[in-house]
Image: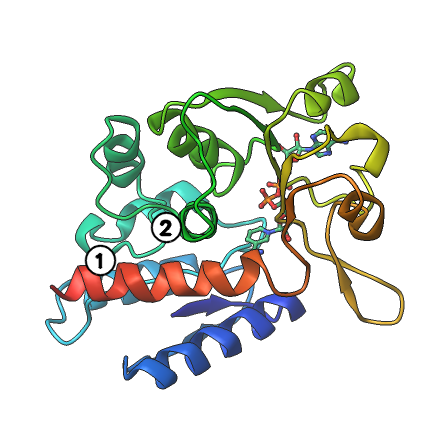
Amino acid sequence: LICVGDHPASQVYIRNKITACDQVGIKSWVYRFEGQRSERAVLNKIVELNSDDEVHGILVQLPLPRSFNIERVIEAIDPAKDVDGFHPVNIGKLFSGKALFSPCTPWGIMRLIDHYKIQVEGKHAVVVGRSAIVGKPMAIMLLERHSTVTICTSKTTNLSDHVFKADILVVAAGKQNLIRGNMVKKGAVVIDVGINELPDGSLTGDVDFSGILEVASWISPVPGGVGPMTIAGLLTNTVKAFR
Ligand code: NAD
C-alpha cells in the first residue's frame, strides 16, 4: 500500500485494509510519502515493487495530492499487480468482457447482488455517478450481465425521472440525501455507495435509508453494505494476482 500525504479518510481506509489483510493471512506493507513533491519517489517505489517477487499486489491510496499526475502513477503499476483494477490495461480488459481485476467497489456490489439472487438480466439498472472507480465500471459490469443501463451525472436533467425507472439503483455521488423515498419505484433494489461524514463524525450514504426502506425490496446500509465488500474485492484480487 502506497499512501501520500495525511488525508484523514485515507488513513482510515489504509488501516481497514491492513486489518483485513492480517485477518486472511495476506502480508502487507505500507509506504508513506510526504505530500506535494514526492511523485518521483512514489514512481521509484512502484518500479521497485513491480520487480519484487515477494509482492503480488500494489495499491496506491487515492486521492493523491493535486500536484501529482494520477495517470502517470497508476500506469507505472505492473497491470498484473494492479489489484485495484485502475490501470488502463485492466480497464480495457473489463470493457472487452475479460476482466483480470475488476475495480473492487463494483465487484463487491455484483457479489452482493448475486449473493441475494437478485436478477440482473433484462432489468433496468440506473447508476448515479460516473467516476472511473465506481460509476463507469459499475455500468459496464451491469451491462455485461445483460441489464439495460442508464448512467446519471451531476449534469443530468430530471434525475428523478431516470431514478424512478430503476429496478436496480446504484448511487455513487457523494451527496447526502440525494435519493429520497418518493424517487424510487416500489420493489427496487437500492445500493448505496456514498460515504458522507456528518458533523458528529458519523457516516451516512447518499440515500435516505429510512424513507426508502418503505418502498425498496432490498437496500444496502451505510456504514456496512458496500464498504466491507470493497475490501473483500481487494483481497480477492490480491489472491488472484498471487495465483
Ligand atoms: P466522484 O466525486 O469521483 O464522482 C461522483 C459522481 O457523482 C460524479 O460522476 C458526479 O457527476 C456524480 N454526481 C454528483 N452529484 C450528482 C447529482 N446531484 N446528481 C447526479 N450525479 C451526481 O466520487 P466517487 O469516487 O465515485 O465516489 C462516490 C461516493 O462513493 C463518495 O461518497 C465516496 O466516498 C463513496 N465511495 C465509497 C466506496 C465504498 O467502498 N463504499 C468506494 C468508493 C467511493
- The residue sitting at 33% across, 45% down in the picture is 102
Q: Is residue 152 above or below residue 56?
A: above
Q: Residue 224: which quarter of the image? A: bottom right
Q: Is residue 169 above or below residue 61?
A: above
Per the image, the residue denoted by label 1 is 81
- The residue sitting at 42% across, 57% down in the picture is 39
Task: Give the amino acid at mark 1.
Answer: Lys
Classify the position of the C terminus by image quarter. Answer: bottom left
User: What kind of element bears circle 2?
Assistant: helix
Residue 211 position in % (x across, y down): 85, 45
* Total numbered labels placed on residues in the image: 2
Residue 200 position in % (x across, y down): 88, 71
Label 1 CB sits under 8 Å from any ligand 1 atom: no
**Res. 220 in view:** yes
Residue count near mark 1 (Cα–Cα under 10 Å), binned few <14, some 14–19, many ≥20: many
Residue 197 position in % (x across, y down): 78, 61
Task: Give the amino acid at mark 2.
Answer: Val
Q: Nearer the viewer, residue 201 or 89?
A: 201
Earlier sequence position, callout 2 versus callout 1: 2
Per the image, the residue denoted by label 2 is 73
Residue 43 position in % (x across, y down): 32, 58
Q: Contact (CB < 8 A) between labels 2 and 1?
A: no
